[in-house]
Image (spheres, coloured by chain):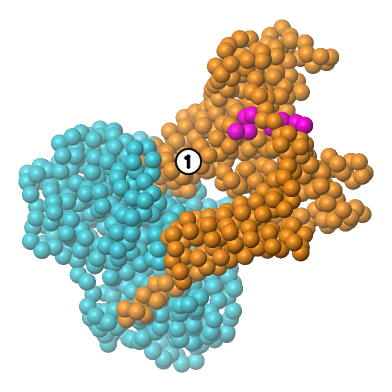
Chain colours: A cyan, B orange
Amino acid sequence: MSSTQSGGGAAPPAVELRGITKRFPGVVANHDINITVRPGSVHAIVGENGAGKSTLMKTLYGMHQPDEGTVSVDGQVVRLHSPSDAIAHGIGMVHQHFMLADNLTVLENVVLGAERLHGIGARARARVRELSAQYGLRVDPDRLMEELGVGDRQRVEILKVLYRGARIVILDEPTAVLVPQEVDELFDNLRELKREGLTVIFISHKLDEVLSVADTITVIRRGTTVATVDPSGTTARDLASLMVGGELPVPGLRESTVTDEVVLDLRDLRVEAADGRPVLQDVSLRIRRGEIVGIAGVEGNGQSELIETIMGMRPAVSGRVELGGTDITGWTTRAIREAGIGYVPEDRHRHGVLLESPLWENRVLGHQTQPPNSKGLLIDRAGARADTERIVAEYDVRTPGIDVLAGALSGGNQQKLIVGREMSHDPKVLVAAHPTRGVDVGAQAAIWGHLRAARAKGLAVLLISADLDELIGMSDTLHVILRGRLVAEADPATVTPEQLGSAMTGAGLSSDDEEPGPREDEAEA
Amino acid sequence: MITSTPAVAAAVTGVVGVAVTALLDLGLIAPVALAIGVAVAAACAALLGPRGSGEAASPLHRRLVPLVAGALAILLGLLTAVIADLWLIEPVAYPLGALVGSLLGFWLHRRLGTLLSLAISAVAIAGVLAFALTALVLLVTGVDPVYTFGRMLSYGSQPDSIVTIINTATTYYLSAVAVAIGFKMKLFNIGVDGQYRLAALLAAAVGGAWVLPPGLHQFVIILVAVAVGGFWAGIAGYLKVTRGVSEVISTIMLNSIATGITAYLLSTDRLAIEIGTNNVGTPPIPESGWIPGIPAGFMGADREIFGLSLLAVAVGVGYWLLLNRTRFGFDLRATGQSATAAQASGVDVKKMVLISMVISGMVAGLVGMPQLLGDSHYYALDFPTGLGFTGIAIALLGRNHPVGIALAALFWGFLNHSAQILDIDGIPKEIAVVTQATIVLTVVVVYEIVHRWGRRYEQQQVGKELGRVKVATS
């Protein structure tokens, strides 16, 4: 804990937070936080969502000022009035929600707002290449942002921070979107940063990862620091109990509820990007009543396209989508939703909620044409409001009322509302993309519980997730998607995250890149 | 606290307001008496019983709404009284105003949402700022602002002025609603101007060429106007949907094209005939196609209010219903807020863009109708132009809210009309333009600031509520 390990006692701490207290009217979000981060170390901050990590990081990044306590950088007490102050002091932050412009290239995104450093031309490009190579970030400065998957986007975010000369890098839940191999790579990058003398502050709730990469771990619970521990002298179990005061929930299914009745049947789907490049090829998939089919894959390998094709937001070039024997290929999104496909989108803020609208209107969203939301052509306000109250109660959405704007709720509560709303229309199929991403432990367990209960009642679920434990624990059948193809099928009962991870990167679970192989397996199953 | 039925509570509020006003009226000047009366009534409303909407939980709501409701009630009560005073005696007019104010105060207190209250406060702050700036400009140019505003107020509240203001406001209102429909979708229909001019010209030509039975005649004229407006705006919508052309660019272009077409058609070789000296216009519409005015003699005015001002009211009500009560309106608002979320929810965004553009154009087609059917009866070179641009300013000022736009349109009309008197005193009447410009700017800025603050405040409130829950469960 104290600065004796590597830096040699003389070096001042890179960051020192002393007695930080941050109050919002009526609530104390942070209370007497004390953290000392040694220079050139990876310091993990763990805690449940809602424990106050984000508030603390906003304080450190200058997004608001603490009511009490001091922030010191390199031994000097500083006052950070804005993120630009923080950047001037060498503090950079990679946010959980990326802040990138889709219509610009990687280079343009990186230099945006930092044009003074190396201009916007060749010099900047060279610098981006250099940083990219130095830390193994593998980003091509000239690609368009909208072509990149979530994993690449994160690397661009890290690059942005490095480009601005940060010596202290804050990473907010960086591994939530990565597969194990990528996580290892990220951790290699972090170690590289560390070797170069940079300091990394790493926010997470994945304890195994934290234990493998961090030099020091600080646990936050209910807004205050409860312990600072050395990873070599602790276990995930100890950390978990420090974090939540109990056991972590484990994803899992009980007995199989899979039936013979195929509800969603995808046949030889082919989808192309705007430039004619195939993003999905020969995708055939069956989901039966009471079955959860998981799709494992590195982000950007066609998962989003698969979901959008099923939901009618993206046309299929060839192939069919059948719902309960009815061909729904080419139907509008609304017709598909009315036919009984529920949708928990991958990106809540883009596809799931209207942040500026009250909760009850968000309950209507996606089911505008169905009771209790509407009567004929009119919106049934009373019905929708009453049903929102029910969802808030049943799905434990923490909110003062249903007239609160959705944007005022935490991510976990927004997600619970979305899950509740999608479940409320008795869907035959639920397309769930990252249903527990960025939600707290309690909400995660609750969402898993709802999925299990619905599965028992015969719901067919397509589960797409980056959390391999979730995939393995919650799926009856697992497919691996790679470059737009389903390349392997795994048995969730026996497969390990490592095996799955290597299949996701193309090293192969069974077959390599042979096209027909896995599809025949699929047909037999 | 006594829980009572809303009807009883409303009655009590009304009686309190009227009684206090009537009593105070004996000792104080009437407007002050009314203000105090309504304020007391509003306080009663705040004390009486539960509120209708479910937002009462938020402290912001508890603090803000009674204030805003009270202030609005006093304002509207005064307005009612001033107008009623034109044909009733003062001891009747002011208690009547107090009654209206008190009941409105009661109703507003129950129904006003937090966001709406914030918006109203923002507009009020902006109004004060705008007037302060205008006063400053007047002071710098050596004119007494109090005297100037006094002149404008006294001239603007004369019966004939009120009628003129209502009539211009009717046209402004239609234009602003047309713009607001676009704004709700994040579409910027700058083309209202071309849409209404083209619509009015063709409608006037059709109306002047045919003689139809009354009723049908007006209906056909309005139908032509709506169709032409919708079609003209639809072109911009179609281009946006199919070719990705920004509606800002295409509507500006379409304005120019409309000007060209109008000039081409408005010649004696084509649709127009000689009207007076140096003026050509479409053949006058026969009397069967006129829409009679509403006589305003009851308040001592010689002029008549446009019959189609009722159409503007209907459009306003329709706009509100469409947006807030229908599925279509929900889809429209959702698309405006987040096109991606709307698409994921099943909205066909492209169709939505096209339809809302057409609807916006249809309303724009109505803009020229009150003037055409209620006053000039033909489309000539002197037909009012530029109303589409005024509509943009008024939609901004009214924050796209049907009532807000109405008040903004009246206010705009008031400034335009009452400034005419300043010429007599040798004060530049362009001062009204200064006020109009500053108020639009300040409203946009202040609204955004207040809105952000409100959102942050709400987030904090949510955090606070959850904090409580946590403490309770831990």
In which quarter of the view is residue A311 placed? top left
Task: Work out whether B337 lies above or below A128.
Answer: above
B215 versus A474 height, above or below: above
Chain designation of label 1: B
Q: Which residue is mark 1?
A: B321
- Residue A128 lies left or right of residue A212; in this view the side is right
Where residue A440 appears, as percent x and y from the top left, is 32, 69
Give the amino acid type for the residue marked by disc 1 in the picture.
Leu
Q: Is residue B309 magenta?
A: yes
Q: Quadrant of the N terminus of chain A?
A: bottom left
Query: In this view, which residue lies farthest toward the top?
Result: B269
Residue at image location 76% in from the left, 55% down from the top: B131
Boundaries of the magenta span: B302-310
> Residue A153: percent from the left, percent from the top?
41, 56
Could you say whether the residue bearing mark 1 is in a helix, strand or loop? helix
Q: Nearer the viewer, residue B260 or B444?
A: B444
Placement of B440 over or under B273, stated as above or below: below
The answer to whether A477 appears left or right of A237 in the picture is left
Q: Is residue A402 magenta?
A: no
Task: Pick the residue in front: A298 or A68.
Answer: A68
Whether residue B426 is visible to the viewer of this picture, yes or no, is: yes
Q: Nearer the viewer, residue A396 or B53?
A: B53
Q: Residue at x 44, y 73 (%)?
A: B464
Q: Residue at x 48, y 77 (%)?
A: A26
- Percent coordinates x, y for residue A346 in the rendering: 33, 53
Task: Give me the residue at 18% from left, 43% from top.
Answer: A264
Residue A484 seen anywhere in this rendered image of the structure: no
Q: Residue B120, image x and y in percent? A: 61, 55
Question: Quadrant of residue A164 in the image?
Answer: bottom right
- Count of numbered marks: 1
